[in-house]
Image (tube, grey):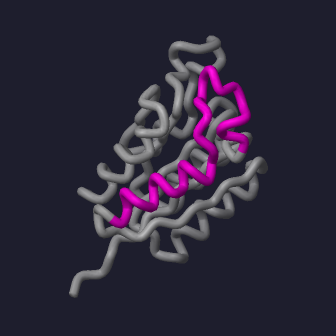
């Protein structure tokens, strides 16, 4: 019997406000709906999935580091606003060496200029942006195949 892959899904600031926050950009699907959608796809793919969300940079770093000790096989991360500001998240992903996929619901390159920079991207095996919540499922499939 093979061991299921274990994927951690990390969401940064304000992602807990999906469905309320700027629905013209992020839609009306809630964070809980997103978790359910990802869990259903994980079941279909035969992988285990767990979730972590925080509005605090240090807590996100701690979650990435804990993924190493928990022997996670992959990380899906939407660092949200920290994408454009956090060298700490970049360093954490580099430190743990776990295959990580960066996901963005919208396409940051089509938004304000400051959103065009992603610090974490340099440590990721892939980036999915502008595919809506479906981007999380694409990331999950990518990591399940690695």
From the viewer's perspective, tell me whether residue 93 is left or right of residue 54. left
Question: Where does residue 21 sit, x and y in percent of width and height?
Answer: 72, 32
Query: How many numbered dots are placed on residues in this image?
Result: 0
Span shown in magenta: 17-43
Question: Where does residue 87 sit, x and y in percent of width and height?
Answer: 65, 41
Q: Outermost residue toward the bottom?
A: 1
At x 61%, y 53%, the residue is 32
Q: Is residue 138 above or below residue 99?
A: above
From the viewer's perspective, tell me whether residue 57 is left or right of residue 72. right
Prevalent SS, magenta region: helix
At x 76%, y 48%, the residue is 55
Question: Where does residue 144 sit, x and y in percent of width and height?
Answer: 30, 59
At x 58%, y 40%, the residue is 29
Residue 31 in the magenta stretch? The answer is yes
Which quadrant is the N terminus positioned in?
A: bottom left
Residue 135 in the magenta stretch? The answer is no
- Quadrant of the image occupied by residue 118: top right
For the residue pair 56 and 134, the one nearer the viewer reads as 134
Q: Is residue 39 above or below residue 139?
A: below
From the viewer's perspective, tell me whether residue 85 is left or right of residue 96. right
Question: Where does residue 53 sit, x and y in percent of width and height?
Answer: 67, 54
């Amino acid at each position: 019997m093979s061991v299921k892959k274990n994927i951690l899904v990390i969401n940064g600031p304000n992602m807990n406000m999906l469905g309320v926050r700027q629905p013209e950009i992020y839609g009306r699907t809630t964070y809980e709906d997103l978790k359910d959608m990802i869990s259903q796809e994980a079941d279909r793919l035969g992988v285990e999935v767990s979730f972590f969300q925080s509005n605090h940079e240090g807590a996100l770093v701690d979650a990435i580091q804990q993924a190493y000790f928990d022997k996670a096989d992959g990380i899906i991360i939407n660092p949200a606003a920290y994408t454009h500001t956090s060298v700490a998240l970049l360093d954490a992903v580099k430190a743990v060496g776990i295959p990580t996929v960066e996901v963005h619901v919208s396409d940051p390159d089509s938004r304000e200029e400051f959103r065009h920079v992603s610090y974490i991207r340099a440590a990721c095996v892939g980036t999915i942006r502008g595919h809506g919540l479906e981007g999380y499922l694409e990331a999950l499939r990518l990591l399940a195949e690695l």
